[in-house]
Amino acid sequence: MSEKGIAHRDLKPENILLKGGQVKICDLGASKVLDRSDKKMNTPYVVSRYYRAPELILGSNLYDCSIDIWAAGCITYELLTLTPLFPGDTEGFQLLEHTQILGQPSPKEHADLSKICDAGTMNLLERCGEAGLVDLERLVADKRPGEEVREVADLIGRCLKWVPSDRISA
């Protein structure tokens, strides 16, 4: 705790504190240096399920800080709507939630994900079936009518890309 705010290690919207016009988000409970060259060093079981990026659900050990960008998009949506965007009860249902909002990855996105994810888990993604891409602006506006949402929906959409390298950076 400091005079400018409170740091909390469990990164969830209910644990983000606004004080003095500043928002501070901090989760250092599992912090470490990420090493994409050492598959054994990174575990895919990180991040609370609702905010877990698809490559983690698909078992990738080759991840970087783009998983935090994904989580930031999920949290931004939840802060606005007071509803989780991807409330899956299990890993499989979580992936199904992703496809219901984002649609299936394009063939190029699928190929790019296949480079960092195990082939067996990629089959799980294929079994999620076809789903259409949801208009995030409309989804946010349905929960927050009358609010200006175009820019924030665009931000959320830029965070929630299937392929980690396609996400915006901090």
Image: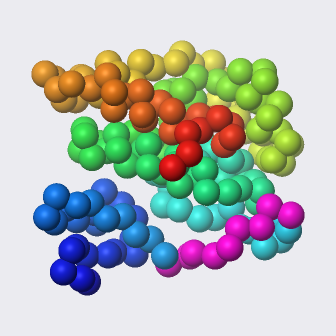
Q: Bounds of the magenta span?
A: 29-37
- Name the one closer to the observer, 68 or 93: 68
Whether residue 127 sits left or right of residue 66 in the image: it is: right
Identity of the residue drawn at 77% across and 38% down? 113
Residue 139: x %, y % from top left: 33, 24
Identity of the residue drawn at 74% across and 28% down? 109
Of all residues, the one furthest to the bottom in this rendering is 1
| Residue 101 visible in the snapshot | yes
| In the rendered image, the vertical position of residue 81 relative to residue 116, given as above or below | above
Residue 18: x %, y % from top left: 19, 61
Residue 153: x %, y % from top left: 37, 28
Whether residue 122 sits left or right of residue 128 in the image: it is: right
| Residue 91 visible in the snapshot | no
Q: Is residue 33 magenta?
A: yes
Name the chief secondary structure element in magenta: loop
Identity of the residue drawn at 35% across and 44% down? 76
Q: Is residue 60 magenta?
A: no
Whether residue 7 sits left or right of residue 114 in the image: it is: left
Whether residue 100 sits left or right of residue 82 in the image: it is: right
Residue 147: x %, y % from top left: 17, 26
| In the rendered image, the vertical position of residue 103 relative to residue 32, given as above or below | above
